[in-house]
Image (cartoon, grey):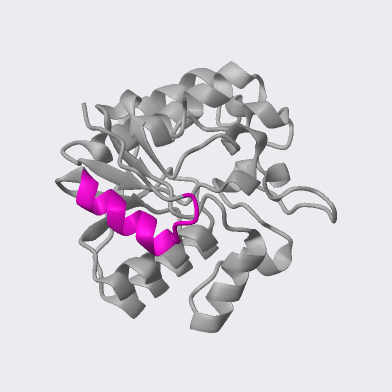
Amino acid sequence: MKSIPEVPSNASPQEILSIGVESAHGPVKLACSFSLEDVVIIDMVKELGLDIGIFALDTGRLNEETYEVADAITERYRIPIDWYFPRHEAVETLGREKGVFSFRESLQNRHECCHIRKVEPLGRALNGLQGWVTGLRREHNITRVDLKYIELDELNGGILKINPLLDWSEAQLLAYIEERRLPKNRLLSEGYRSIGCAPCTRAVQPGEDARAGRWWWENPEHKECGLHKR
């Protein structure tokens, strides 16, 4: 089991990334959903020259606009993206037995869909890694307020989980994106603030929090897909 490195309370995202990579003592990759957070992290990684790879989970239900960001990232940075897909047998069985919208019928069904499309592929993506980077922020949801900059991911073999943007606000992200002229999802201009699978994501209303458009039929404390289960 790895030990958690000391991270100053005022550490910058760049410092957190550097400490995390050094402490991992092995391969580290970013789990990329092509969100504002992930695009910012990729830019920081390239600026720092850190040896961090990128992987993405294609659930089979992503928006076209998400693929556009992926293509723009590949073009801008000339970096490979390792794509992971759900096991087709599991997807076929779920659709055959419960239908294509079973995830809206109960929390249990939604977790089942997320497990097939996200959690199981994540396990394969993390295999052999010593650390992974996420774009989690405390501002996202009540489920993320007690996260640490660098944690032990005991559910995935005790590797390091590095969260460099925990303290950043949405305004900071947008300012960084605009200053650096980085790619961003076109859906953001249509009221979307957190973008996942197309059937589980919608635009938010004025005054709603960023993740109000994710699984909008569920209570806030349930709005995790299982990738960041604690």
Q: Is residue 228 left or right of residue 125?
A: right
Residue 178 seen in the figure: yes
- Between 137 and 188, the one lying in front of the other is 137
Q: Position of residue 86 (x, y in %)?
A: 35, 36
Q: Is residue 101 left or right of residue 136?
A: right
Tell me if residue 38 comes above or below residue 112 in the rendering: below
What residue is shown at x 25% (from left), y 69% (from top)? 79
Q: Quadrant of the N terminus?
A: top left
Where is residue 20 shown, x and y percent of the image?
29, 49
Taking the spot 32% from the left edge, 75% from the top edge, the residue there is 47
Give the extent of the magenta segment.
9-23
Which residue is pictured at 67% across the width and 45% down the height? Answer: 211
Q: Inspect the magenta stretch and tell me whether residue 198 lies in it.
A: no
The quarter of the displayed image where residue 101 is located = top right
Q: Is residue 27 left or right of residue 33?
A: left
Seen from this angle, which residue lies furthest right? Answer: 206
Give the main secondary structure of the magenta stretch. helix
Residue 178 picture location, percent across and down:
58, 79
Look at the picture and state if 205 lies above or below 189. Answer: above
Q: Position of residue 55 (x, y in %)?
A: 30, 52
Which residue is nearer to you in this view: 116 or 225? 225
Residue depicted at x 54% and y 74%:
177
Total labels drawn? 0
Q: Nearer the viewer, residue 22 or 196?
A: 22
Residue 55 in view here: no
